[in-house]
C-alpha cells in the first residue's frame, strides 16, 4: 500500500529526523530577519529506470534525491535556498540564506506547527512499481519489443523504457500548517523505427500516470508498442503537408496540447499579476468561442497531472478557467492569490526542492460539446486532421503558440485522406479559440505522457479535449497550394 | 582562495564510492561527483523579486559486472547511503543483460595532464549579492529607459555558478576540474497605444566576468528587439530567401550537431546516416566542434569518460566529416571516441558537443540582407518541429520582412519549413559577423529559399 499523509509525516520523523520541533526551529531561522511568511518543502524521491534496446536490457538506473527547499516571502519578493543535507545545522544555514530577502531583525513569533490530515485519495495504490521485482518489468518491455516487431516487417528497431518514481513530500509553513503527500508516477515509452527501401521513419508512444503496476491492467505493453509501430509505418506513406492557413480538425485526447499552449500558460497568474500575459486584465471578457469551456482539474483519478495538495501545501482542486468563451479565473499560487485577493487555487507547483513554486497547470481540458465528431470532419472541404503530437510552445506576451503534429492527415471533401509528414502549426491564442466552430461530444484525456516546461522547471501534466473544429490555423508544410501565394 | 578547497570534495566523494564498488566485487566501475554553488538575483521593475543561493552536491556510480552495467546516484552522501547505492547498483547489474560493448574508456585515450583552459574566474566566488543585484538593476533600467513605449518588464537576473566535477575509474583514471560561469538576462515588453504588446529578451553567458556583455548593452538590445516587433502581423504564404540572424543560425549548428551524434547513427535516427565525406551542404558552410577553446563554456580538459577533449570538424566546406562519439557508441560502430561524452551523476555517458561554431564567411551582414528583394529576416523560432530521422524542419517563427534589400515591417505568427539537407545546400551567403552565444558561435546565414506559411 502507498503511504497515507500520516505515514509520510512518520517517515520524515523516524527516518530523517524531521519532526514538528525540527521544522519549528528551521522556520524560526527563516523568519529571523522579519520575513512575512516562510515555507519548508521537504522531498524524498526514489526513482528508477530500465531501458531495453536491441532486444535486451541495456541499462538499469536507480537514484535517490532528497532535500529541503526553504522559501521566505517578503511582500512580492522571495528568498530561496535549498540543501540536500537534512542535518539541523545545514537546514539552519539554508534558512538563514533565504531569510536575507528581509532586512529586519525583529524576533519572530515562534511558529506552532500542527500536522494536518486530509483525504488523500486521488492516487492511492496497492503496490508501488518501485518495489516490483525488476524481472516483471523486464517482461513488460520484452512484450512491447516483440509486439512492435510483429506489427510490421519494416520495424527495424525498437527501444522501450520504463521510468518510475515515488515521492514523499512534506510541507511546513509559518502559518503552522504541516501537510504531506505520497506521489507515485510511472511512465512506459516505446520508440519504433520503420525502414523500407532505405527510407527511415520513426515514432514514439507511451503512457502512464500516478499509479503502480496497475497501469498495465487497462493498458497492455503490446497496445502501446503497436501504436508506436503503426505511426512509424504510416509515415512511410506520408506526403508533404500544405503551407498556408486552413481549417483543422483536432482529434479527441492529445490535441488538448492546443489548450495547454493557447490559453493554459497565459492564464497562469504570475504572468497576469505582472501584466505580461495577453490575457492580463481580461477576467469576465470573451476570449474564445461560446462553445469553449476550459477546466484545470487536479482531481482526476490517477492522472499524470493530478495532485492531492500542491507544492505550497494547498488542497488542489478543479478550477473553471473559461466558461462558454468567457475568461473566468487564473491559476493561482500563494503570491499571486495574495496579489489578487483570492483564495489560492492549488496550482503552486515546482520541479523539486531545488526550485521555488509558481502557478502551473495540472490536467487541463475542454469540456464536451454536442457535435458528432465525424460530422466535424465532413464540414471541411480542404484541411488537416491532427491526431498525435510531439510538443508545443507559447509566447505568453503576444499570444502566439505552436504545436508539432507527428500524425496528421489531409481532409479533402469531408473525408480524411492521405497522411502528411511532420508539420508545425502556429496560431494566436484568443484568435484560434474564437475560431472554434465545432466541439464533439467525445471528451478524452491523454494517456500520461506529457511534461510541461516553464522557466527551466518540468512538471508532469495531463491534457484533454473532445474532437474540435477550428476554422483556420496556419499550417507550416512545404507544399504550396495553387493560389495560396507566390513563388520565388 | 575559493577554488582549490572547492575542487577537492567531489574527488574525495567519487573516490570513496568507487572504492566501495571495488570492494563489493564490481569488475569495472566509474564514479562521478559534482558540487556547485549557484547564486541568482532577479529584479523586476527595479524592485528585488528573488534571491537564491544554494550549494548542491551529488554522486553517481556505474558498475559493470560480467558485461552487465547499471548506474545509481544519490544526493545523500553519508557512508550508509553510499553503501546502499553500491548494493543497489550490484543488484541492478545482475538483471541487465551482457553487452559486449559496455565498458570504460580506453586508458590510452584518457587525459594525462590538465591543459590551461581558463575555465575559472577567481572573481566569481568572491562576488557578493550586491554585485548581482546592481548588475540586474542596471540591465533592466537601461531597457526600461530605452524608449517611452517600453511599458513593462518580465524581469532581469544576474546569476553565477562555481562548480567542481570529478571522475574516477577502476582503470586508474582520476581527474577533477573546477569552473565558473556568470550569466545575465532581461525581458521587456513594448506597447502601442492600441494595447498590443510585444516582448523580447536578451542574455549573455560566459565563464568569466570580463567576457560578459555590458549590462546596459544587454538591456538596450532587449528593448530594441521588443520595439522593432511592434505592429508585427502575419505574412502571406510564399517561398522566399530567409536570412538567419546569428543567434538563430547558432541554433541550426546545434541541430546539425545533434544529428551528428554517434548514438543517433547507431539508432539510424539521423538524416546524416551514411553521408560521411559527402557534400551535404553549401561549400560556404564549415561547422566545428571544439572542446579546447580557452575560457569558453563548452570547454573542459577531459570528457565524461576521462577522454581528452579535442577539435572535431563536423562540416568542412560543405562536406560532412563524421559523427561525434563516446567510447560505447564508438565500440558499437567500430569508430573511435571523439571526446564527446557528457556525464551527469544520474546516468550513462551521453554524446554532446563542446563549443560549436559556424565559421565566419566574407560577406558583410548588410550585404546579405541588401541582396534580398523580398524575403524574411528570421529572429525567432518556436517549438520542436525538427525530425532528426528525416530532416524535416517545420517551426513557428517571427522576424522582419525584407523589401528591396531593406529591413521593412515586422512579421509574426508564421511558420518556416523545409528539409534540413535542402536547407544546408541552399545556404548562399555566410556573414563576416560571427558572435558567441554561450557555447555556440555563428555569423548571419542566408538560405536561397524556404517555405514561409502565413495567411
Image: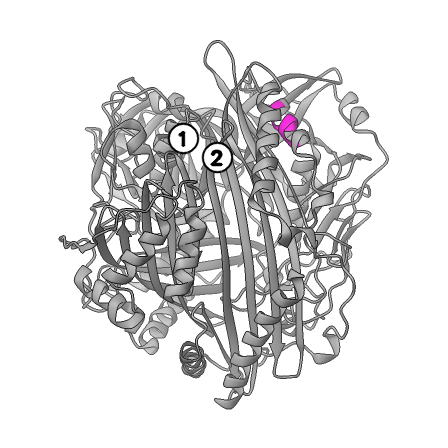
Q: Is disc 2 placed on a helix, strand or loop?
A: strand
Residue located 58% across and 67% down the image: B349
Tell me the chain of label 2.
B
- Magenta segment, which residues? B218-223
Residue that badge 1 annotates: A271
Residue sitting at the far right? B362
Q: Nearer the viewer, mark 1 or mark 2?
A: 2
Is residue A267 or residue B276 the one in the foreground? A267
Magenta highlight on residue A463: no
Residue located 72% across and 71% down the image: B336
> Which quadrant holds the C terminus of chain A?
top right
Q: Which mark is residue B351?
A: none
Coordinates of residue A440 in the picture (x, y in percent)? 24, 32
Overall secondary structure of the magenta stretch?
Answer: helix
| Crowd tier of the residue under label 2, counting other residues whose Cα lies within 10 Å: few below 14, some 14–19, many 20 or above | many
Seen in the picture, residue B64 relative to A163 is either above or below; the reply is below
Residue that badge 2 annotates: B48
Coordinates of residue B288 in the picture (x, y in percent)? 76, 52
Q: Are marks 1 and 2 in contact (CB under 8 Å)?
A: no
Q: Quadrant of residue A82?
A: bottom left
Residue sitting at the far front? A106
Seen in the picture, residue B236 relative to B155 is either above or below; the reply is above
Tags 1 and 2 both on a single chain: no
Residue located 70% across and 57% down the image: B120
Amino acid at each position: 500500500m502507498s503511504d497515507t499523509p500520516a505515514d509520510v509525516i512518520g517517515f520524515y520523523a523516524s527516518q530523517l529526523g524531521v519532526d514538528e520541533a525540527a521544522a519549528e526551529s528551521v522556520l524560526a531561522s527563516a523568519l529571523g530577519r522579519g520575513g512575512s511568511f516562510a515555507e519548508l518543502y521537504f522531498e524524498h524521491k526514489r526513482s528508477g529506470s530500465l531501458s531495453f534496446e536491441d532486444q535486451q536490457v541495456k541499462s538499469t538506473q536507480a537514484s535517490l534525491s532528497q532535500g529541503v527547499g526553504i522559501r521566505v516571502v517578503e511582500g512580492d519578493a522571495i528568498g530561496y535556498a535549498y540543501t540536500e543535507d537534512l542535518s539541523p545545522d545545514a537546514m539552519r544555514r539554508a534558512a538563514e540564506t533565504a531569510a536575507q530577502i528581509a532586512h529586519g531583525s525583529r524576533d519572530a513569533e515562534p511558529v506552532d506547527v500542527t500536522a494536518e490530515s486530509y483525504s488523500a485519495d486521488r492516487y492511492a495504490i496497492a503496490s508501488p512499481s518501485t518495489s516490483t521485482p525488476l524481472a516483471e518489468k523486464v517482461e513488460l518491455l520484452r512484450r512491447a519489443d516483440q509486439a512492435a516487431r510483429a506489427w510490421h516487417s519494416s520495424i527495424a528497431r525498437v527501444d522501450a523504457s520504463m521510468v518510475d518514481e515515488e515521492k514523499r513530500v512534506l510541507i511546513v509553513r509559518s502559518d503552522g500548517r504541516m501537510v504531506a503527500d505520497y506521489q507515485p508516477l510511472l511512465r512506459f515509452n516505446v520508440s519504433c523505427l520503420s525502414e523500407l527501401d532505405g527510407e527511415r521513419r520513426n515514432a514514439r508512444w507511451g503512457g502512464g500516470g500516478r499509479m503502480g503496476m496497475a497501469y498495465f491492467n487497462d493498458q497492455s505493453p503490446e497496445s502501446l508498442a503497436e501504436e508506436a509501430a503503426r505511426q512509424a509505418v504510416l509515415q512511410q506513406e506520408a506526403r508533404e503537408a500544405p503551407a498556408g492557413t486552413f481549417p483543422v480538425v483536432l482529434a479527441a485526447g492529445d490535441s488538448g496540447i492546443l489548450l495547454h499552449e493557447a490559453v493554459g500558460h497565459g492564464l497562469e497568474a504570475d504572468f497576469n499579476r505582472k501584466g505580461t500575459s495577453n490575457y492580463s486584465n481580461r477576467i469576465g471578457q470573451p476570449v474564445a468561442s461560446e462553445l469553449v469551456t476550459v477546466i484545470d482539474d487536479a482531481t482526476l483519478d490517477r492522472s499524470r497531472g493530478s495532485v492531492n495538495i500542491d507544492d505550497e501545501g494547498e488542497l488542489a482542486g478543479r478550477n473553471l478557467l473559461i466558461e462558454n468563451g468567457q475568461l473566468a479565473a487564473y491559476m493561482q499560487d500563494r503570491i499571486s492569490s495574495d496579489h489578487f485577493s483570492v483564495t489560492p487555487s492549488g496550482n503552486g507547483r515546482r520541479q523539486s526542492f531545488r526550485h521555488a513554486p509558481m502557478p502551473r497547470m495540472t490536467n487541463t481540458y475542454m469540456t464536451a460539446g454536442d457535435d458528432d465528431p465525424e460530422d466535424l470532419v465532413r464540414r471541411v472541404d480542404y484541411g488537416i486532421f491532427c491526431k498525435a503530437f510531439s510538443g508545443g510552445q507559447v509566447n505568453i506576451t503576444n499570444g502566439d503558440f505552436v504545436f508539432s503534429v507527428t500524425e496528421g492527415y489531409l481532409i479533402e471533401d469531408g473525408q480524411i485522406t492521405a497522411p502528411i509528414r511532420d508539420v508545425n502549426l502556429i496560431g494566436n491564442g484568443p484568435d484560434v479559440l474564437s475560431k472554434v466552430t465545432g466541439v464533439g461530444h467525445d471528451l478524452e484525456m491523454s494517456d500520461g505522457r506529457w511534461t510541461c516546461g516553464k522557466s527551466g522547471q518540468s512538471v508532469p501534466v495531463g491534457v484533454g479535449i473532445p474532437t474540435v473544429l477550428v476554422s483556420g490555423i496556419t499550417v507550416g508544410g512545404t507544399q504550396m497550394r495553387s493560389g495560396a501565394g507566390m513563388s520565388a | 582562495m575559493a577554488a582549490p578547497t572547492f575542487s577537492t570534495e567531489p574527488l574525495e566523494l567519487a573516490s570513496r564510492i568507487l572504492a566501495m564498488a571495488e570492494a563489493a566485487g564490481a569488475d569495472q566501475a566509474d564514479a562521478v561527483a559534482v558540487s556547485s554553488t549557484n547564486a541568482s538575483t532577479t529584479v523586476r521593475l527595479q524592485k528585488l523579486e528573488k534571491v537564491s543561493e544554494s550549494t548542491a552536491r551529488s554522486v553517481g556510480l556505474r558498475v559493470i559486472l560480467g558485461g552487465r552495467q547499471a548506474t545509481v546516484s544519490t544526493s545523500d552522501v553519508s557512508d550508509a547511503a553510499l553503501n546502499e547505492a553500491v548494493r543497489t547498483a550490484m543488484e541492478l547489474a545482475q538483471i541487465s543483460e551482457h553487452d559486449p560493448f559496455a565498458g570504460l574508456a580506453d586508458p590510452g585515450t584518457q587525459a594525462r595532464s590538465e591543459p590551461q583552459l581558463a575555465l575559472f574566474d577567481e572573481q566569481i566566488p568572491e562576488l557578493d549579492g550586491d554585485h548581482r543585484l546592481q548588475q540586474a538593476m542596471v540591465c533592466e533600467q537601461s531597457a526600461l529607459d530605452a524608449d517611452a513605449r517600453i511599458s513593462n518588464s518580465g524581469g532581469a537576473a544576474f546569476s553565477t555558478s562555481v562548480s567542481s566535477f570529478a571522475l574516477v575509474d577502476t582503470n586508474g583514471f582520476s581527474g577533477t576540474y573546477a569552473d565558473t560561469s556568470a550569466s545575465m538576462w532581461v525581458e521587456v515588453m513594448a506597447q502601442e497605444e492600441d494595447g498590443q504588446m510585444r516582448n523580447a529578451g536578451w542574455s549573455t553567458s560566459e565563464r568569466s566576468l570580463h567576457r560578459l556583455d555590458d549590462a546596459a548593452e544587454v538591456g538596450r538590445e532587449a528593448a530594441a528587439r521588443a520595439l522593432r516587433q511592434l505592429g508585427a502581423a502575419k505574412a502571406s504564404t510564399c517561398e522566399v530567401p530567409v536570412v538567419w540572424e546569428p543567434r538563430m543560425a547558432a541554433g541550426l549548428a546545434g541541430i546539425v550537431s545533434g544529428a551528428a551524434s554517434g548514438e543517433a547513427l547507431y539508432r539510424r535516427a539521423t538524416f546524416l546516416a551514411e553521408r560521411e565525406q559527402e557534400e551535404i551542404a553549401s561549400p560556404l558552410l564549415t561547422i566545428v566542434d571544439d572542446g579546447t577553446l580557452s575560457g569558453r563554456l563548452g570547454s573542459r580538459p577531459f570528457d565524461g569518460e576521462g577522454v581528452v577533449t579535442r577539435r572535431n570538424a563536423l562540416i568542412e566546406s560543405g562536406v560532412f566529416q563524421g559523427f561525434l562519439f563516446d567510447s560505447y557508441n564508438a565500440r558499437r560502430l567500430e569508430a573511435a571516441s571523439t571526446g564527446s561524452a557528457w556525464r551527469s551523476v544520474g546516468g550513462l555517458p551521453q554524446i554532446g558537443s563542446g563549443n560549436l561554431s559556424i565559421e565566419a564567411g566574407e560577406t558583410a551582414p548588410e550585404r546579405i540582407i541588401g541582396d534580398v528583394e523580398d524575403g524574411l529576416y528570421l529572429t525567432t523560432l518556436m517549438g520542436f518541429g525538427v525530425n532528426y530521422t528525416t530532416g524535416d524542419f517545420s517551426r513557428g517563427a517571427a522576424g522582419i520582412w525584407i523589401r528591396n534589400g531593406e529591413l521593412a515591417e515586422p512579421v509574426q505568427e508564421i511558420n518556416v519549413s523545409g528539409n534540413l539537407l535542402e536547407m544546408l545546400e541552399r545556404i548562399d551567403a555566410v556573414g563576416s559577423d560571427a558572435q558567441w552565444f554561450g557555447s555556440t558561435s555563428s555569423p548571419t546565414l542566408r538560405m536561397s529559399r524556404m517555405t514561409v506559411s502565413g495567411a
